[in-house]
């Protein structure tokens, strides 16, 4: 691990974000301090509250502070840095990792250049003057050779002005793979429509934005539309409710990770109605092309960073509807960086066809694994004892997703299979290329006894299936199985 230079967002801070944080500390902090960066003051303030809630936090409160960075004439910062003593780095990273509120690498790269050039900075109050001093110059839109002051320059920044990005940006926009950054709002609308169910086939942006598109009538959820999209675990439960314990909400995955078991959402909904708690369902693994869970959930969440984008290069409903909608509208901040929205929109145009291809590949791999005598179990919704729970919510043309797990009859076999499987290795899921990981070792290395209580074995191997040729993938799996069988005999 000492030689690791980077990794999955959520575990590692991207190098571009690290570099920007270091620059801010150099200018506004001290050698004993570090910083974590957030897209708004509100999120940074939540980080401060998290710090102050820690029993171990005893430093002078003045050493923990927010530095807001503003562009142009904006009254709202686009970077809010939380500065703290390096001794508290673990607590800071815990908030960053589990809140999901950090900035993207694209925002970091853009704002870092603007910060170094003096076009992004703090607002310093001047004695005797009502308004604070502004940053030295303004942020312009587009490549430098086209930089002219326009009316759009009074708005939030739309594109990177520095030479290092000009060529890439030109190619992406000229050949139609990306939109111009100025169309970020349209890109966000297109993303929300896809999620809301208004679009059920692969279409381009112009088709997406036509006013004739409306939420699909198969949704069976009244008043639900793209305006309700915001880009941002029964038996024991029933007994506890019967004994008088009360809950605000129940959160569950559909299906779960990594054993791919599907919860009985109909029963959960019945309990929720009886004992008055909200149901929050994360359907990232199955995704909303394969299943339709919204009628039984109060809130549905989905990680767009996974299969919705596929390219792995961008992050990004109910009896309580009225109350939740009002609360979200009051609290919601659109912190989605324009350039990230543009990449997300482009990557998701063929979302529907990609899902069908991935479904087929995953079943083929499962069938190959299930035919091997050295395999102990294959975990996949189609072959799970909880399949009926999944099938109830499966859409007419839906499949069982692209995530599966496999265990072997010996640890040596599991190791050999993982080592010899000729695919990319990594902890994420939902990429267009197949990913393999020793999931339990990576995610729960220090709590293997705890995971074992739930039937999750330490040598479980997880696969996130991609778009490769089906025969190519099954051939690779057979070769890895052959190597694993040899390892089991030695």
Image (spheres, rainbow, N blue to C red):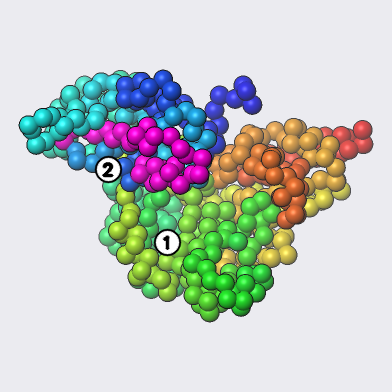
452 to the left or right of 49: right
> Dividing the picture into quarters, in which one does residue 417 lie?
top right
* Residue 180 percent across, percent down from the top left: 29, 37
* Element carrying mark 2: helix
Residue position marked by numbered label 1 in the rendering: 197
* Residue 318 percent across, percent down from the top left: 43, 71
Residue 272, disc: none
436 to the left or right of 416: left
> Dividing the picture into quarters, in which one does residue 73 lie?
top left
Q: Residue furthest right?
A: 489
* Residue 368 percent across, percent down from the top left: 76, 48
Please tell me which residue is depicted at 62% across the width and 76% down the height of the picture: 243
Please tell me which residue is depicted at 57% across the width and 53% down the height of the picture: 285
Tell me the magenta residue range.
Answer: 44-73
Residue situated in front as seen by the camera: 293 or 479 = 293
115 to the left or right of 196: left
In the image, residue 161 sits, relative to residue 485, either above or below, namely above
Is there a contact, CB below 8 Å, between mark 1 and mark 2? no
* Residue 226 percent across, percent down from the top left: 35, 60
Quarter holding the N terminus is top right
């Amino acid at each position: 691990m000492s030689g690791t230079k980077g990794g999955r967002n959520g575990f590692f801070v991207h190098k571009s974000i690290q570099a920007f944080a270091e620059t801010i500390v150099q200018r506004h902090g001290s050698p004993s301090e570090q910083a974590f960066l957030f897209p708004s003051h509100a999120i940074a303030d939540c980080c401060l509250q998290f710090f102050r809630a820690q029993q171990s936090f005893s430093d002078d409160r003045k050493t923990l502070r927010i530095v807001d960075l503003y562009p142009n004439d904006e009254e709202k910062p686009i970077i809010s840095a939380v500065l703290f003593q390096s001794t508290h780095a673990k607590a800071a990273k815990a908030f960053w990792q589990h809140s999901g509120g950090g900035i993207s690498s694209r925002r970091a790269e853009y704002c870092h250049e603007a910060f170094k050039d003096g076009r992004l900075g703090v607002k310093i109050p001047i004695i005797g003057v009502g308004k604070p001093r502004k940053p030295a110059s303004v942020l312009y839109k587009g490549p430098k050779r086209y930089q002219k002051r326009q009316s759009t320059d009074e708005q939030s920044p739309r594109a990177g002005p520095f030479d290092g990005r000009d060529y890439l940006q030109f190619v992406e926009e000229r050949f139609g793979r990306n939109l111009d950054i100025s169309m970020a709002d349209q890109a966000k609308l297109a993303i929300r429509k896809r999620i809301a169910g208004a679009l059920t086939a692969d279409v381009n942006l112009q088709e997406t934005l036509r006013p004739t598109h409306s939420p699909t009538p198969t949704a069976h959820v009244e008043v639900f539309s793209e305006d309700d999209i915001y880009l941002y675990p029964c038996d024991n439960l029933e007994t506890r409710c019967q004994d008088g314990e009360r809950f605000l909400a129940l959160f569950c995955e559909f299906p779960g990770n990594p054993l791919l078991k599907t919860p009985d959402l109909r029963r959960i909904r019945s309990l929720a109605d009886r004992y008055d708690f909200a149901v929050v369902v994360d359907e990232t693994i199955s995704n909303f092309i394969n299943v339709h869970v919204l009628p039984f959930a109060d809130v549905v969440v989905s990680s767009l960073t996974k299969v919705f984008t596929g390219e792995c290069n961008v992050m990004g409903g109910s009896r309580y509807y009225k109350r939740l909608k009002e609360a979200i509208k009051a609290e919601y901040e659109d912190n989605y960086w324009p350039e990230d929205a543009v990449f997300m929109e482009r990557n998701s145009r063929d979302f529907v066809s990609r899902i069908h291809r991935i479904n087929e590949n995953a079943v083929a791999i499962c069938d190959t694994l299930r035919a091997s005598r050295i395999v102990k179990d294959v975990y996949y919704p189609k072959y799970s004892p909880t399949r009926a729970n999944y099938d109830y919510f499966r859409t007419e043309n839906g499949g069982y997703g692209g995530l599966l797990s496999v265990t072997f009859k010996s640890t040596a076999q599991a190791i050999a299979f993982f080592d010899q499987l000729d695919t990319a290795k990594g902890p994420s899921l939902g990429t267009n290329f197949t990913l393999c990981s020793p999931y339990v070792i990576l995610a729960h290395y220090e709590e293997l006894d705890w995971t074992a209580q739930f039937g999750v074995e330490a040598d479980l191997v997880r696969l996130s299936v991609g778009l490769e040729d089906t025969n190519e993938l099954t051939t690779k799996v057979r070769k890895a199985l052959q190597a694993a069988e040899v390892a089991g005999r030695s």
